[in-house]
Each structure stands twice: as C-alpha cells, then as structure tokens.
Amino acid sequence: MSNTVKGVIARAKGEPVEVVDIIVPDPGPGEARVTVQACGVCHTDLHYREGGINDEFPFLLGHEAAAVVESVGDDVTNVAPGDFVVLNWRAVCGECRACRKGDVRNCFNTHNATQKMTLADGTELSPALGIGAFAEQTLVAAGQCTKVPESRPEAVGLLGCGVMAGFGAAVNTGGVTRNDSIAVFGCGGVGDAAIAGAALVGAHTIIAVDLDDTKLEWAKGFGATHTVNAGEGDPVEAIRDLTDGNGVDIVVEAVGHPEVLKQAFYARDLAGTVVQVGVPTPDMGLPDIPMIDFFGRGGALKPSWYGDCLPERDFPMLVSLYQQGRFDLDGFVSEVIGIDDVEEAFHKMERGEVLRSVVSMREGA
Ligand SMILES: NC(=O)c1ccc[n+]([C@@H]2O[C@H](COP(=O)([O-])OP(=O)(O)OC[C@H]3O[C@@H](n4cnc5c(N)ncnc54)[C@H](O)[C@@H]3O)[C@@H](O)[C@H]2O)c1
Ligand SMILES: [Zn+2]
Ligand SMILES: [Zn+2]
C-alpha cells in the first residue's frame, strides 16, 4: 500500500517550487520509507530548481534531513522501524571498482531507492541527491539511513549534506590539522562548517572570505580568526598579508565559481592544497591559470564529494560532539520554517539572510 503525502517539487526550470501530493511506495528489497522530521535548505536544492544539476524535472527537493524509519523492505537489516536516522546521499555499493579497492568513500555506484516516487498522475519524480526530503515521508535505499543518537532533528539533519560537506572538505579532503593555516572562500552553511572543523582540529589561522559582512561576522562565531571581504580589494593580497606574505596551507572553495577557484589557487602557500567543495554549473570552465604556475606552485587541487565522508563513521561522531557542546550545529539553524516556506527560503538564501532555513515537520519545533 503506497502513502500519499505532501512534498515540495520543482516542476520546471526557474519556476517557483510547489507543495503537492506525492505518492511514496511501500519499501521493496533494500529500501526504507522514512517519516521526515526536519530538512535543511541547501544551495544545491536551488541549483536543481535552476536546472544547474540536470534536466530531469520534476524534482522532489530537499536532501539534508533527520527522520524516523517508518517501514523497511524484507531483507533490510541495518535499520528498523522507529530508528532515528540522518539521511545520507552516498550509500556505498561494496562492489564497484572503487569499493573493491577499499576506497569506499569514492564509491562510483552509490545506492538510491529502486522504486520511483510519483505525482498523483503517475509522473515519476527525481528526488534531489536520491533523497527528496522536503516531504512528510520519502523512500530511500536502506543504506542511506545512518542511525545516530536521538537529538534535535533540525540541527543534526544538517549533517546529511552541507555541514558534513564543509567539515569534511577541511578535515578529510584538505587534511587540516593543528599548526595549519586555512582560508575558506564562501561562508554559507558549507564554508562555516569548514571553519568549525578547522577550529575543532586546532588550525592556528582561519581566514573567512565572503562578499557579505554579516556572513563574515557569523563566520567568527564558528572560529574564524580573521575575515576578508572579497568585494573590498584583492582577497589574495589580503590573505598573503595575514600570512607573512606566504599564503595559507589549505584553501577551501565553497562558492563554486571559476574566479573564486583562481583566487583560491593563488591564496595558497607553495605546496598547499586547494579543496573545491562549491558546485559549479555545467557552463563553467576551469580558470585561466598558466601551466607553469600549476607546476611551479606544487601541492594539490582536490574536488571534495560530500567532504570525503563515511556517513557511518562521521555522522554519529559529529552528533556526539554536538551533544557534548563541542560542535555548534544549532548555530547553523538560522530559522525553522514550514513545508510551505521553501520558495521564500530560497530568496532569503539569495539575499544572504540565512545560513540554513530548516523545514520542520514536527509539532512545536
Ligand atoms: N561538494 C559537495 O559535496 C557539496 C555539498 C553541499 C553543498 N555544496 C555546494 O557548496 C556551495 C555552498 O553551499 P551553501 O549552502 O553554503 O551556499 P550559500 O549560498 O549559503 O553560501 C555561499 C556563500 O558564498 C558567498 N559568495 C558568493 N560569491 C562569492 C565570492 N565571489 N567570493 C566569496 N564569497 C562569495 C555568499 O555570500 C555566501 O555567503 C554551493 O555551491 C553548494 O552547491 C557542495
Ligand atoms: Zn561502490
Ligand atoms: Zn546539499
């Protein structure tokens, strides 16, 4: 028996999102149906709505969520009804070329639900990142459910995407550690999580770069030691000035723009690392950088998928740090909104008024 629930869809490129009835099938083998408790609004949802990811409209948006498992397919053993979970968008297959090499965080064939959720007229939906959690219920692969200690869903759901991606970009992909310096371009939810991660592991210099002074102020709250407004002069010069003329050990690009990648490239010390976690649109090319600079400056340029995380390892660890008061997930929750408010949340994101608007499905959240 399928369930009919409310969900937020993007029907066509650039059109405002709509709240409509969607049909969520019973879980089949390897699947779980979950009751969503909270789901953050990530810039990637807006990328989907703008046609920046692919053209497979209509999309069921939302992908950074905490939920309770409602029912599971016959063969599912990793979760059971009633479990509190954070949804992940990289359920590894265990069988592809990367997995067989033991490189599971790069799995090339991550799992999503096999069955499709649909509109009432039978039109198949494309769930954002295989999740689709701006909905009262959604259907995922059971491996997309990561069990975590019960906590405030509006906060820990953010681990499902932006916060994990940013934290992991700095700590996992960039390998930032004590005695390092780091600059983070773009201080939204992703960038601020990179800053919080760098602070947690003891980086001594943490430079926040944004165009918006409010964002820079918030970044200080997550541990930035210095701020640079990239709209008021050359941020590369500013970063060099703050690092004895050398540049930083690690730069995280959390915007997704060629010009920013170029600045990140040159803001780095010799042999430093650039981590690209911001998502570009398909029309963007690599910046024009002389090849002699690529060679001559050494180091590494690394794209970061989902912060190179392993959800089963990293989500419970970060929830535990949150519960101990050592990782401020509540600080990312700018506002708690209803399922009807996603379109307005996109506008607030575009105007730079929020880090995360979080849709809550709970009474009294
Ligand atoms: N790689 C991944 O796995 C992954 C996961 C989640 C999100 N993302 C991507 O990360 C990026 C950031 O996401 P978010 O939710 O934090 O977005 P956001 O819109 O909240 O934040 C982006 C920030 O960048 C700033 N900015 C814009 N142009 C800038 C410039 N030229 N220089 C400096 N700062 C600038 C904005 O003022 C804003 O504060 C997006 O591209 C998103 O799609 C990637
Ligand atoms: Zn695999
Ligand atoms: Zn996201």
Image (spheres, rainbow, N blue to C red):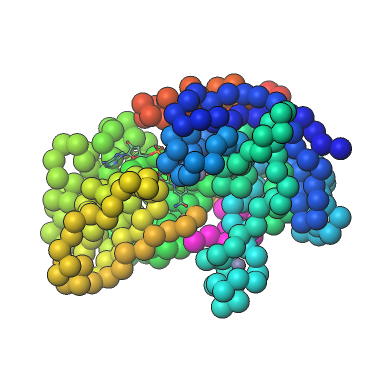
Query: For the C terminus, which image quadrant?
Result: top right
The quarter of the displayed image where residue 156 is located: top right
Q: Is residue 98 above or below residue 64?
A: below
- Residue 42, visible in the rendered structure: no
Q: Residue at x 59, y 30 (%)?
A: 9
Judge by depth and name the residue closer to the eye, 34 or 353. Answer: 34
* The residue positioned farthest toward the bottom in the image shown: 101
- How many numbered circles are shown? 0
Q: Is residue 51 above or below residue 298?
A: above
Q: Is residue 174 magenta?
A: no
Q: Residue at x 82, y 36 (%)?
A: 2
The answer to whether 80 appears left or right of 96 in the picture is right
The quarter of the displayed image where residue 352 is located: top left
Q: Is residue 317 magenta?
A: yes
Magenta residues? 308-318
The quarter of the displayed image where residue 151 is located: top right
The answer to whether 285 appears left or right of 172 in the picture is left
Q: Residue at x 65, y 30 (%)?
A: 7
Judge by depth and name the residue closer to the eye, 355 or 43. Answer: 43
Q: Find residue 291 and report its horizontal and vertical position in percent.
A: 17, 67
Query: For the N terminus, which image quadrant?
Result: top right
Q: Residue at x 34, y 35 (%)?
A: 215
- Residue 106, visible in the rendered structure: yes
Q: Find residue 135 and report its horizontal and vertical position in percent.
A: 66, 32
Q: Main secondary structure of the magenta part?
A: helix
Q: Find residue 318 and report its horizontal and vertical position in percent.
A: 57, 53
Q: Find residue 206 and report its horizontal and vertical position in percent.
A: 31, 52
